[in-house]
Image: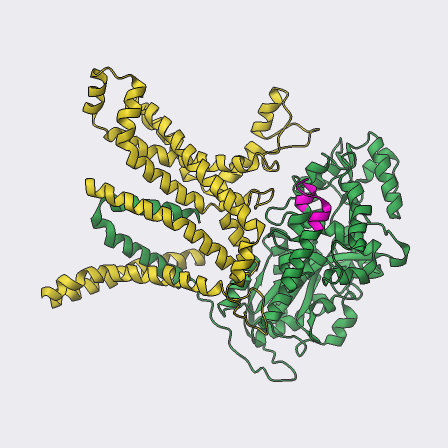
Amino acid sequence: MPGREDDDRELIVKITRNRAWRPLTAATALALVAVACGGGDNGEAENGDAGSGEAELAESGEVTMLHAFTGEEDLAGLNAIIDAFNEEYPDIEVLQEGSNDFESLARTRIGASSAPDIILHPQPGLLEGFYNQGVVQPVDNIVDVDQLESDAVGGLLDLVTFGDELYAVPVRLALKSLVWYSPQTFEAGGYEVPETWDEMMALTDQMASDDVVTAPWCIGIESGDATGWVATDWVEDILLRSIGPEAYDEWVAGELAFSSDEVKGAIEEYLVPIWTNDDYVFGGQEQIARAAFGDSVSGLLSDDPECGLHRQATFIEGFIEQNDPDAEFGTDYDFFYLPPILEEYGNPVLGAGDFAALYTENPAANTLIKWLTSPEAGEGWAAQGGFLSPYAPVFDGSVYPSDSSRRASEILAGATSFRFDGSDTMPGDVGSSSQSGSFWIEMTDWIQGNQSLDDALANIDELYAEVSG
Amino acid sequence: MGETLLSGFIAILAGVAGVFAVFWGLNALTERIGGTFEEKFKPWVFFGPAFLVVAVFLIYPFFDTIRASMYADRFVAGERPFVGFENYQSVLTDSETWLSLLNNLQWIVVVPALAVLVGLVVAVLADRLPAKRESIVKSVIFLPMAISFVGAAAIFELIYKIEPASRDQTGVLNAFLGLFGIESISWYGNTLTNDFALMAIMVWMQAGFAMVLLSAAIKGVPQETIEAAHIDGATEFQTFFRVVIPQIASTIVVVLTTILILVLKIFDIVRVTTNGRGNTQVIANYFYTFFEGGNYGRAGVVVLLLIFMTLPFMIINVKRFREQEATR
């Protein structure tokens, strides 16, 4: 965009300077256009036989894949998966492409009928949108659904099953219901890992009055144009523990309003007391929206720790390592399972993950989709870290490189219920966009002190009603 | 990587050569036919391809945007149904729209005026320096023009940053305030300061552009008129405001409107800093948020709004240029 304004101006200057330049300017413009058009030779996917029954599988060909991974570690992990696939199918070339602007890119490609063969979806909400658009291919006739059902973490397939047909296969999971801490801080203060929410609040109180840490919690929800997602994770974890997985499902589906007594009540009772208490949060409430989520965890690890607790998903370990390469899991930092609130709901677990969905009829892509459903497919990535297998019940845990992954996998396998990140499952406009009225934006506006919680929740309800209406 | 670079290089070469060949070939063709035909058609040969490019990439999308603005954002049975003016109603009754419009208005009032003011002051003062120093000063002021909006926003992040009270302030502004014992300000978070904090970035970037054009205009003011004013006993200020300013007025207007059009489309700076949070939303970012979410209908309405806001200023600008051209 910045280029265009400058061009306007250059053009104006040129025109006033010398009229003879005009044809040349036009020629240059045309040349640029020619380049722009010539560059993108994606090629239409060749249509295979898409009859009923078993889908056609090919042992050679080309598969294009679009994903949202841009970080070095994620890309290395994905490449490990692709390498393992190529060992078995050396004649299938997988062309993967990652983008920060994944969502608009996917939409544009699909809109222009040049969809990639496979899209790796971090948000089932967007996949459902594409399903409604009628552009996704079902994978029922490619994979063994019954086998998948018994191998995968419970409830995972329901997320990508629309109208009785399966539309994607899970590739990776992340576990979100974790509280990170430093064992050294806990030792210095004589603290113990809490088993219940009440114990956790008592610990919070204790930390606030002690001098071991500046404040009990480090909370940061700043994340560029996705600012606010950390807040939605907190709300989801609290709801799972206070109103239960079934009411949670209703809430995600838009049947239970954000302003309802259940949801609003739970936020007021469990989130507000921590978030709005300046003694409980490092830097006070106002710091929450300013602190970048990846930086805020650094407060745990220092000689003079700024905080003692940090609730975040498994992937925060990468940020910890980045901030302090010498830190070791188990001695310098550790995590515990975010404790339950009401006993009747057991130990629910909140997670997120990536699903591979099929957008063309390409037999080689079918082969890749089918291959991804074997639990061993993820071993390459698992060995690198930053990866939990969605097939936790049958996955070989010894592949994981660290105790942290193994323990997270145990929590996952031992959970009484698993629920996917609700904001990623809601319609994209509500759950994962930065338009006004979205879950992200309204929670951020609230914690910044720009509006009341009541207004924030009512605004989200309003957008949800508009979107589904 | 190397392969991509190579194919990109070949594409550029082939593109430029191809276009050259097209123009050369068409030109040769008309010359061969000759006579009145050549006279009549030669302009079209050169104008035609440019027009085609504009038509395909500007005019057609414009009408397609109007079409898209009348179709729903939600899919019904795999299609976006026609909804007429429903999107218009939805956008125009959304308080966010009016907030964005108000903010854009704030931007177009403050930024062009300040950029021209700063540019003018620098141009006038630099004019009095020896030639070598003048060019150094002007280069420094012009430098920010070479930085991308996103880069500028990243630079200002270092200026506006705020740390928790228990840490040392690393942001330049807040560290400075700290010297005087003044409490740190969240420049992007505070709704009183955030709009102006963002505008300051734009002024910093555009003052150089204003300075260059205004400096040229000032140098173009005939020395006799200034000397005459001095002989008549006018003070420096009187000379500047009554003799110099009227003579560079047309350039000031052109600079103002050019920056104004740029500011109307302000997007990058807001996108990468506040992303519209804390009441800083502007039309272009508001549009992009809809676009990103696949809400092409409402995105279309907003972008049409932006076009119709920009249009009058474009017309003024072109008119001014024509007048200027005519007087030369």
**Location of residue A467 with respect to B194 vertically, above or below:** below
Whether residue A402 is visible, yes or no, is: no
Q: Can residue B257 be seen in this view?
A: yes
Q: Residue A389 falls in which quadrant of the image?
A: bottom right
Counting every numbered tag in the picture gives 0
Magenta stretch: dominant secondary structure? helix
Chain that appears yellow: B
Kindly give the residue lying farthest to the right in the view shown: A343
Q: Which of A305 and A284 is in front in this view?
A: A284
Percent from the top left, x then y, of residue A286? Answer: 69, 37
User: Which residue is pictured at 63% across the width and 61% down the height?
Assistant: A467
**Residue A78 appears at what percent x and percent y?**
62, 59
Task: Check the image and report above or below for A432 versus B184.
Answer: below
Could you tell me which residue is drawn at 33 percent across and 25 percent down? Answer: B124
Q: Residue at x 56, y 28 (%)?
A: B172
Q: Give the range drawn in magenta.
A: A444-457
Give the position of the C terminus of chain B as an image quadrant. Answer: top left
Measured as percent of width and height from the top left, residue B36 is found at 10, 65
Q: Is residue A181 left or right of residue B97?
A: right
User: Residue A445 colored magenta?
Assistant: yes
Observer-nearest residue: A95 or A236? Answer: A236
**Horizontal arrangement in the rendering, residue B12 relative to residue B301 (left or right):** left
Q: Depth check: A227 or A305 in front?
A: A227
Taking the spot 80% from the left edge, 41% from the top edge, the residue there is A273
